Amino acid sequence: MIYKVIEVPAVLRYGFLIQMERKMIVLKGVSKRYFAGFAAVSAVEKVDLTIPSGSIFGIIGRSGAGKSTLLRVMSLLEAPDSGEVFYGDERVDILQGNELLQRRRRMGMIFQNFNLLGSRNVTGNIAYPLEIAGVTKKQIHERVDELLELVDIRDKRRARLRELSGGQKQRVAIARALAAKPEVLFCDEATSALDPQTTRSILALIRDLHGKLGLTVVLITHQMEVIRAVCQEVAVMEAGRIVETGSVEAVFEAPQTTAAKEMIHG
Ligand SMILES: Nc1ncnc2c1ncn2[C@@H]1O[C@H](COP(=O)(O)OP(=O)(O)OP(=O)(O)O)[C@@H](O)[C@H]1O
Ligand SMILES: [Mg+2]
């Protein structure tokens, strides 16, 4: 028994070190500003960040810190004003047309408000990205079955969205995000609309999927307990900048910046 207690963390640690060697996403000097009337808002300011392949990486910061903007740049929904985005060694912020589309198909995204299609039932929502990608009906049917199983909502396959709880809707959104077998899952406040118990079950699912599928997960939140529950590494954002990064353990034990101290201690 004692042997097991010692052995498991060691295995996890070595696994994590191996993953650390591979860079999944690298941001170099990324900035993004918006113009509201005559005023410019610097939403993201000269961000350098490396997200290791296979990690669960958290980005935390107060409302307006620039987390969603950073995630949109990282997921190629928006181009940065300056700076570069790499996936592995490939520069991706300059991709256009079909190349951009192909790259984006290798990413999944989930949001606070689920962003599901109200006109479609559960199966229809999960099948949607596969239909767009031109997958055959038979393959879609098989893949949807697998995904329903993966997120544990087999009994809801024909349910309308209005018949689902928030947690069940987020499971549908996760299944849809994973339909095309992405290598990275971006989560923008995915549990912020859920009660604490449902939050725990969704975070457990994300952790489980990360382990099973070897996904890289980038998770943004303003809730420290979310970071603590699932992330290995964390970056703290304040006013568009990353002010601190490190292992979750290190940042929790000895936060260096005022922003990190305030996030942890309230
Ligand atoms: N499309 C936009 N047009 C104008 N300003 C924007 C736009 N998107 C974001 N901003 C501004 O950029 C800054 C960063 O916003 P962002 O949504 O990235 O923050 P956030 O950390 O995700 O906040 P929250 O926790 O509230 O979601 C804010 O000042 C916001 O008002
Ligand atoms: Mg946001």
Image (cartoon, rainbow, N blue to C red):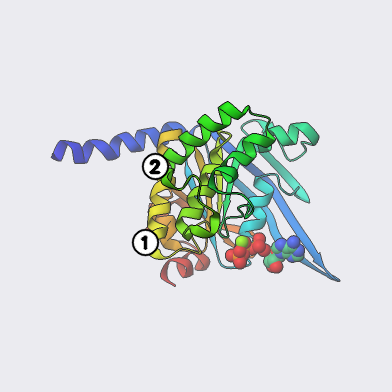
User: Residue 180's spot in the image, x, y percent?
Assistant: 58, 34
Q: Position of residue 94 (x, y in %)?
A: 77, 38
Quadrant for the C terminus in the image: bottom left
The residue positioned 54% from the left and 43% from the top of the image is: 123
Give the crowd class for mark 1: few <14, some 14-19, many >=20 residues within 10 Å. few
- Regarding residue 245, the answer to whether it shows in the image is no
Query: Looking at the picture, which amino acid does disc 2 mark?
Result: Asp
Whole-number angstrom distance, CA of label 1 to CA of label 2: 17 Å
- What residue is rendered at 43% in x and 50% in y? 231
- Give the quarter of the figure containing the N terminus: top left
Farthest front residue?
A: 158
* Ligand 2 quarter of the rendering: bottom right
Question: Whole-percent x and y of residue 113?
Answer: 58, 60
The answer to whether mark 1 is within 8 Å of ligand 1 is no
Question: Residue, x 50% and y 53% (percent of image)?
Answer: 170
Q: Residues within 10 Å of mark 2 (few under 14, many from 20)?
A: some
- Disc 1 marks a residue whose amino acid type is Gln
Q: Which mark is residue 208?
A: 2
The answer to whether the residue labelled 1 contacts the one labelled 2, judged by CB atoms less than 8 Å apart, is: no
The image quadrant of residue 103 is top right
Estimate the x, y position of residue 23 in percent, counting from the top left.
56, 35
Viewer-proximal residue among 142 and 253: 142
Residue, x 42% and y 52% (percent of image)? Answer: 203
Total marks in image: 2
Asked if residue 181 lies left or right of residue 168, the reply is right
Label 1 or label 2, whichever comes before in sequence order: 1
Kindly state the secondary structure of the residue where label 1 is placed: helix
Q: Is residue 21 visible?
A: yes
Instruction: Name the residue carrying label 1.
Output: 197
Q: Is residue 208 above or below residue 245?
A: above
51 is higher (above) or lower (below) than 139? below
